[in-house]
């Protein structure tokens, strides 16, 4: 069965480390993701970024770049038989990444960039559009429409919170209900929604303590899927460590979200 149909029919989980630090890290996390996909009636997708193009500081680690990153994702895909996804930031990256990935992720900051959305759409891959921190759920009709009118109806919409003053986010879970009205699968980004953007002295802070609560609240509002970044040692991760789930705790976080 095609991946998009699997996503429509059962809970899906997009899981992986924030950024590609090295191949061994990807293998370690992918091994757990594959295990969870075998153990539970869910669809799992492995995620990691080849370039964190919107880091707070120019001195922060960004990733291995698109060429090396696609090689690393291809290795994961082949070794663990997992569908994979990554985020793109420029239109030319869509066709390059589409040679490997099953889902192209559009970052929240870029969700209204028409050329990026159209470039992703014409690859024929699933397009996961993350809701900008300055938009409502109802506003997301228009980014989705750009993908659909470019000839691709395989759209996922992802909630990840709204700006609330400086260095803080708040989640209005009504956005999930509103986005589901468009007829697309809706995902909850449980880790980026607990960020404190730029709030840790030149990098983004946050608190992973709230990730399980974000997920459960999203389930109550009808979320179809859950996005969670995970890492075996998040306190020493090269990007977004405060918000990632500790890998050994990942199973306990997702179990309450599964419909048996």
Image (cartoon, rainbow, N blue to C red):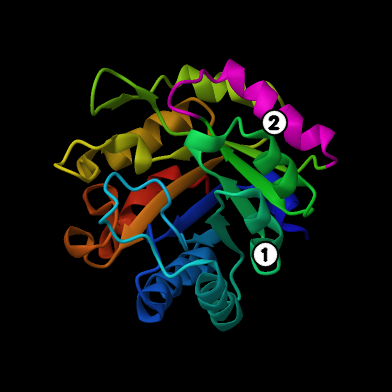
For label 2, the SS is helix
Q: Which residue in the rendered view is the most extreme toward the left? A: 201
Which residue is rendered at x = 75% and y = 28% of the image?
Answer: 145
Which residue does the image show at 48% across and 47% down from the upper left?
258
Sooner in the amino-acid sequence: mark 1 or mark 2: 1
Q: Is residue 25 magenta?
A: no
Vertical arrangement, residue 206 with respect to residue 37, above or below: above
| Closer to us: 65 or 32 | 65
Residue at the spot of label 1: 96
Q: Is residue 93 left or right of residue 251?
A: right
**Residue 51 spot, x, y in % from top left:** 45, 59
Residue 164 shows in the view: yes
Nearer the observer: mark 1 or 2; the answer is 1
Distance of label 1 from label 2 (alpha carbons): 22 Å
Residue 249 position within the rendered picture, expressed as x and y whole percent measured from the top left: 27, 59
Residue tagged by mark 2? 144
The part of the chain drawn in magenta is 132-151
Instruction: Assess whether residue 145 is covered by the magenta stretch.
Output: yes
Residue sitting at 66 percent across and 29 percent down? 143
Label 1 SS: helix
Quadrant of residue 181 within the rendered picture: top right
Q: Position of residue 68 (x, y in %)?
A: 51, 75
Residue at horizontal 45%, vertical 66%? 33
């Amino acid at each position: 069965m095609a991946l998009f149909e699997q996503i429509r029919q059962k809970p899906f989980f997009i899981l992986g480390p924030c950024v590609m630090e090295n191949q061994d890290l990807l293998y370690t996390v992918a091994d757990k993701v594959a295990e969870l996909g075998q153990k539970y009636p869910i669809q799992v997708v492995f995620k990691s970024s080849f370039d964190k193009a919107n880091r707070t500081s120019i001195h922060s680690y960004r990733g291995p770049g698109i060429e090396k990153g696609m090689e690393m994702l291809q290795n994961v895909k082949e070794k663990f038989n997992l569908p994979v996804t990554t985020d793109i930031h420029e239109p030319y990256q869509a066709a390059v990444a589409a040679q490997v990935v099953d889902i192209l992720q559009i970052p929240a900051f870029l969700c209204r960039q028409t050329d990026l959305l159209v470039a992703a759409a014409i690859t024929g891959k699933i397009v996961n559009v993350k809701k900008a921190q300055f938009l409502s759920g109802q506003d997301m009709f228009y980014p989705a429409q750009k993908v659909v009118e470019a000839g691709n109806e395989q759209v996922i919409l992802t909630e990840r919170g709204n700006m609330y003053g400086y260095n803080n986010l708040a989640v209005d879970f009504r956005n999930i209900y509103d986005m589901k009205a468009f007829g697309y699968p809706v995902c909850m980004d449980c880790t980026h929604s607990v960020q404190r953007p730029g709030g840790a002295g030149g990098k983004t802070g946050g608190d992973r303590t709230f990730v399980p609560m974000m997920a459960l609240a999203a389930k109550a509002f009808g979320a179809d899927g859950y996005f969670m970044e995970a890492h075996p040692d998040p306190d020493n991760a090269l990007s977004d460590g405060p918000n990632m789930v500790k890998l050994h705790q990942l199973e306990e976080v997702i179990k309450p979200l599964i419909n048996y």
